Image: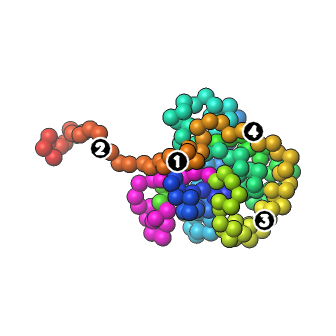
Amino acid sequence: MLFLNGFHFISGHPEQVIHANHHCSIMSTDFIQCAIFVPGTNPARLAGVEYIISGNAFAKLPLEERQLWHSHQYEVTSGLLVEPGMPDNVDKEAMKILVNTYGKTFHTWRYDSKNNSLPLGIPEIVNGYTANGQVPKELVEGRDKMFGLNHTEIRGNRTDIIAPPVIEGADSWKDGFVLELVIKNTTRFVGPNLPPDV
């Protein structure tokens, strides 16, 4: 198991920041799957899922598929992606792997229904941040306080982690793409117990 904490934003809405706990299972050297929960909720609120794949696996994807994925290079080197409770040396070894990974993330609990008691609406595609100043400072400071961390120190401890170039097609939001899921009725199914005119 792997426990990660970081920040996402809704595709097309970088101001809609989601603080996210990731509870992950390592499926193979190329694939990790994570259940995402909202920090500080009791009982813990399931927000969505993130699939994480290696750079090698991502490079084999067609460009159409790549637009659904975001890079982790900046999240790792900036100290925004953290492993709360892990010693620095253990954290660093994990981050040396994660710095060359990509995530595809869906939040089933929509940002605009975060105050609702039920996960209403269509799931949302979310992205990861890629540069300084994109995540509000107060949110990062609040996260650090929650877990007893200092992301500035964590960032300094990772200066020797070399981030490979982001592979073409990832972080499609930077090219102006806004990705949304829609409900589309493409066929009319008539079940065995339904008359054709229902």
Amino acid at pointer 2: Asn
Front position among marks 3 and 1: 1
Amino acid at pointer 4: Pro
Front position among marks 4 and 2: 4
The foreground one among 1 and 160 is: 160
Image location (x, y in percent) of residue 187: 26, 38
Amino acid at pointer 1: Gly
Front position among marks 2 and 1: 1
Q: Earlier in the sequence, mark 2 or mark 3?
A: 3
Q: What is the quadrant of residue 137 in the picture? A: bottom right
**Within the magenta stretch, is there residue 15?**
no
Image location (x, y in percent) of residue 169: 58, 37
Which residues lie in the magenta part? 111-128
The residue depicted at 52 percent of the width and 58 percent of the height is: 13
**Residue 150 horizontal side relative to residue 35, left or right:** right
Element on which disc 4 rests? loop
Element on which disc 2 rests? loop
Q: Earlier in the sequence, mark 2 or mark 1?
A: 1
The residue depicted at 71 percent of the width and 46 percent of the height is: 73
Residue with the mark numbered 2 = 185
Front position among marks 3 and 4: 4
Residue with the mark numbered 1 = 176
Residues tagged 2 and 3 counted as in contact (Cβ below 8 A): no
Disc on res. 149: 3
